[in-house]
Structure formats: C-alpha cells, structure tokens
Amino acid sequence: QVQLVESGGGLVQPGGSLRLSCAASGFTFRNFVMSWHRQAPGKERELVAFINNIGGSTNYKDSVKGRFTISSDNAKSTVYLQMNSLKPEDTAVYYCTADYSTFHYWGQGTQVTVSS
C-alpha cells in the first residue's frame, strides 16, 4: 500500500523556519521524482519544489528560491523541505507527491501558517 505521510507543519512567525518531512512507503522511492506542492485558501495548487531521486537534480518556484531547500534521503525513503525566512504568503497546505512513469501519488497534506 502506497503511503506518503507529511509532518512538520505548524504556526510560525514571519521570518521563522520550518522543516517539512514526507515519509514514503509502498513503492521504490529511489526511482521517483519527489515534489512539494502547496495550496492556499482560494488559490490553485502550485508546485513549490521537486527533486529527482535519480541524480538529485532540483528545481524551485521562483518565489521560494534562496529560502526553501528540498532534499531526499533514499535510505529513509523520506523527502524534506527546509523553509527559511517564511512569509505570510507562504501560508498554505503543503502536499508531498511522488511521480514515476504513469505512477502519481499524493499525501494528505500538512498545514503551514505564517502569522504574527
């Protein structure tokens, strides 16, 4: 059974940091492209960052470049999103996804709220 379980969300003040984790199981993690998406209230879901577990290449949404870092631990089948210098506009539900060929999986999401 495929599972993507996100954790690490919460309430943080502007300028603060959070690290999201996504623990994967039920598929061959090292073959997949792992991504973080987010969806804010009233807005469409958007891609934040992804990492290709084959080779380790990464890419980021422009608005998070220099503030967010995606990383992956194949031994633990876990992908992370380190988020620094958080802004109120980063407030959203953050989802972990996994893609390989025709396979596409989503996690349940974790809420991130940036507010003073």
Image (cartoon, rainbow, N blue to C red):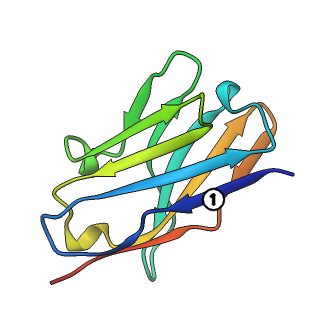
Secondary structure beneath label 1: strand
Residue shown at 21%/53% (left/top)?
Answer: 84
Q: Residues within 10 Å of mark 1 (few under 14, many from 20)?
A: some
Q: Residue furthest front?
A: 76
Quarter of the image containing the C terminus? bottom left
Q: Quadrant of residue 4?
A: bottom right
Residue 32: x %, y % from top left? 66, 31
Residue shown at 23%/59% (left/top)?
Answer: 17
Residue 98, above or below 6: above
Residue 42, above or below 96: below
Residue 50, above or below 113: above
Residue 115, above or below 29: below
Residue shown at 25%/51% (left/top)?
Answer: 63
Q: Judge from the rendering whether residue 41 lies leftward or rightward of residue 86; answer left or right.
A: right
Residue 30: x %, y % from top left? 66, 26
- Number of numbered discs: 1
Q: Residue furthest top?
A: 55
Residue shown at 56%/41% (left/top)?
Answer: 78
**Depth check, front residue: 7 or 49:** 7
Circle 1: residue type:
Val
Residue under label 1: 5
Q: Judge from the rendering whether residue 59 lies leftward or rightward of residue 63; answer left or right.
A: right
